[in-house]
């Protein structure tokens, strides 16, 4: 299914806010020369053909006007897969093209995209072909960051990392990263890339108050290797917001029954809602919403370069950015959070 042609004639010509850099924080990524906005916008959901393009445009422009410079995509984002990159490309061409050099655009490959043995995982064949398709969908000559999206159990890591090195040398990406790698396999990837002369810039793991595996050994590895970290799903796809505290609201991801990795109703358990409610009470005492506190809780760690937010409307971007007003926690607050989550300090 293709989204009907979108007519920009109904919209005024876009000019970016002159104040866009005044209130955003920028953090250096590892020991590279690159800085990322403390919040980055992910286009995993809400940017496909099933979504109104006018709303996609409004979210993207609000993010850029707010100082968010990093826009994170993947070959399979949107419904159907690839449609998020195409919609992003339309908006980039019409509105954001004059600002391309102020933007960090990333994409990924690793999950299923087309039939046959070359349409997923981590072979050189798949990664090169997929990035070529992504560049065409977005209408750009290169991406700033290209990630391998998930480890491939059947392809030698040397081949996968060699493909990432080749992509940089071809000028199709400025930096490369990995996503969803456990610490042990990430360490091997870093070593291979360093020997190839294209060090890994950044790692993108799943991390939130509800998913804390990175604290065991990944974050310490990233600090040791001077690799950046940009967690995804920091709000546990909405569980760490007020959205589901009183049921499943109309228009939410769960209510829409989205595919492509979106949360389903089974994830909304009595235990998760109980914990979210207690966390919301603590956030209120801090003068924050639950979502703002959940983002702040991740950004408190100086090993975090940026945190990826999603948005279904522009107001959510504005709301999320307020987390930067206070991402400092007292020991008492941190202990209370661990107590609520039933988490042991790692």
Image (cartoon, rainbow, N blue to C red):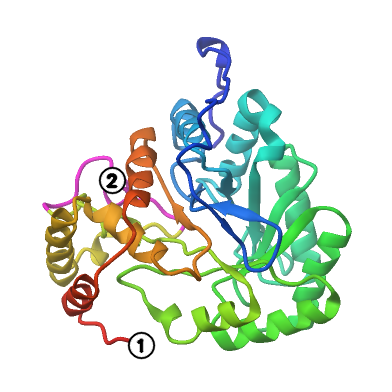
Depth check: 319 or 246 in front? Answer: 319
Identify the residue at the far right of this view.
170
Span shown in magenta:
246-260
Q: Is residue 262 above or below residue 12?
A: below
On the image, the x and y values in percent for residue 55 come to 43, 29
Q: Magenta stretch mostly in which secondary structure?
A: loop
**Badge 2 is on which residue?**
252
Mark 2 and mark 1: Cα distance apart in space: 34 Å
Depth check: 186 or 302 in front? Answer: 302
On the image, the x and y values in percent for residue 318 come to 36, 38
Q: Residues within 10 Å of mark 2 (few under 14, many from 20)?
A: some
Q: Secondary structure at mark 1?
A: loop
Label 2–label 1 contact, CB within 8 A: no
Q: Quadrant of the C terminus?
A: bottom left
Q: Quadrant of the N terminus?
A: top right
Residue 247 in the magenta stretch? The answer is yes
């Amino acid at each position: 299914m293709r989204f009907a042609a979108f007519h920009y004639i109904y919209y005024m010509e876009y000019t970016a806010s002159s104040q866009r850099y005044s209130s955003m924080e920028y953090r250096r990524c590892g020991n590279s020369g690159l800085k990322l906005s403390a919040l980055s916008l992910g286009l995993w959901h809400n940017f496909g053909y099933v979504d109104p393009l006018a709303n996609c445009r409004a979210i993207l422009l609000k993010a850029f006007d707010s100082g968010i410079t990093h826009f994170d995509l993947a070959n399979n984002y949107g419904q159907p897969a690839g449609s998020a990159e195409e919609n992003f490309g339309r908006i980039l061409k019409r509105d954001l093209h004059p600002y391309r050099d102020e933007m960090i655009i990333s994409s990924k490959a690793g999950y299923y995209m087309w039939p046959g043995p070359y349409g997923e995982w981590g072979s050189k064949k798949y990664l090169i072909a997929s990035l070529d398709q992504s560049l065409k969908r977005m209408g750009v000559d290169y991406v700033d960051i290209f990630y391998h999206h998930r480890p491939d159990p059947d392809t030698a890591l040397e081949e996968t990392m060699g493909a990432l090195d080749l992509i940089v040398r071809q000028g199709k990406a400025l930096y490369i990263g990995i996503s969803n790698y456990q610490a042990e396999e990430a360490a091997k990837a870093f070593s291979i890339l360093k020997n190839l002369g294209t060090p890994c810039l950044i790692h993108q793991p799943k991390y939130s108050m509800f998913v804390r595996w990175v604290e065991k050994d990944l974050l310490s590895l990233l600090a040791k290797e001077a690799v950046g970290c940009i967690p995804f799903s920091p709000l546990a796809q909405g569980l760490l917001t007020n959205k589901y505290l009183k049921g499943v609201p109309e228009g939410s991801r769960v209510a829409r029954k989205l595919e492509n990795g979106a949360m389903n109703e089974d994830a909304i358990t009595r235990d998760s809602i109980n914990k979210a409610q207690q966390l919301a009470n603590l956030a209120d005492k801090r003068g924050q919403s639950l979502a703002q506190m959940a983002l702040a809780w991740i950004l408190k760690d100086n090993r975090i370069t940026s945190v990826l937010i999603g948005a279904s409307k522009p107001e959510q971007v504005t709301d999320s950015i307020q987390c930067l007003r206070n991402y400092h926690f007292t020991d008492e607050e941190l202990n209370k959070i661990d107590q609520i989550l039933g988490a042991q300090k790692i």
